[in-house]
Image (cartoon, grey):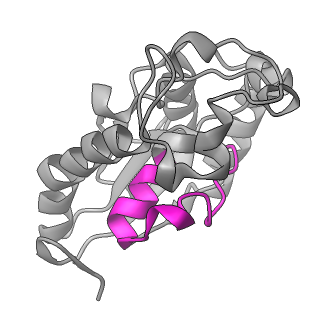
Amino acid sequence: MAENKTGPSNGSLYIIRHGRTDWNDLRMLQGKTDIPLNEDGRRMAAEAAKEYAEIPFDICFCSPLVRAKETAEILLRGRDVPVEYDDRLMEMSFGVYEGVKSSFDIPDCPVNEFFFHPESYDDPVEGGESTRDLMERTGSFLREKVYPRLERGEDVLIVGHGAMNSSIVCNALELPLTEFWSKGIENCKLMKLL
């Protein structure tokens, strides 16, 4: 039985990242920019719907960004699973660097600090969030919305984003920020956390 800060968990917690977008394919930083799925992303979500059709979910919490909403809609089509949107599940904000292509190819690009050393990304780019900002908002979401449902024995699905889902992983498993990216967050691959 998994333990969390609120006591024993009887339900299960699952997370999944949205399907691919044109910006993913172009290696552009999306953050909170509201980019829809592309055809490949929709196909991925439809395949995930088939692959995970037998996994029961009592509720789905979802980012309000369209790429996550579309993924949840396709994934849960024909299933009686309520979907609730919460702003705390939006992707991390990359501020003025949203829309930048191939940031790793830009020498001294400050947002790359987050990808290489998330534990020390305390001074975010203009208009962006720090790692700790992201951890705080997803931590409060888990405490307020998810853990009470797990304690009632409900199975919870979160549909979100790469960085945001990684923060859910770190919060739920109580991992240090040095392991922020350790679990890998692939598009449309379901991960059971608790």
Q: Is residue 74 in the magenta section?
A: no
Residue at 55% across / 23% down in the picture? 31
Count of marks placed on residues: 0
Residue at 29% across / 37% down in the picture? 82
Confirm whether residue 188 shows in the render: no
Residue at 16% across / 55% down in the picture? 143
- Give x and y (percent) for residue 3: 24, 82
- Give x and y (percent) for residue 93: 47, 24
Above or below, comparing residue 107 to residue 114 in the picture: above
- Give x and y (percent) for residue 10: 22, 77
Q: Residue furthest bottom?
A: 1
- Give x and y (percent) for residue 138: 30, 45
Comparing 177 with 62, the one in front is: 177
Q: Is residue 173 in the magenta section?
A: yes
Residue 21 quadrant = top right
Region of the chain picked out in magenta, as a range: 165-187
Above or below, comparing residue 50 to residue 35 in the picture: below
Confirm whether residue 6 shows in the render: yes
Comparing 94 with 146, the one in front is: 94
* Left or right: where 132 falls relative to 94: left
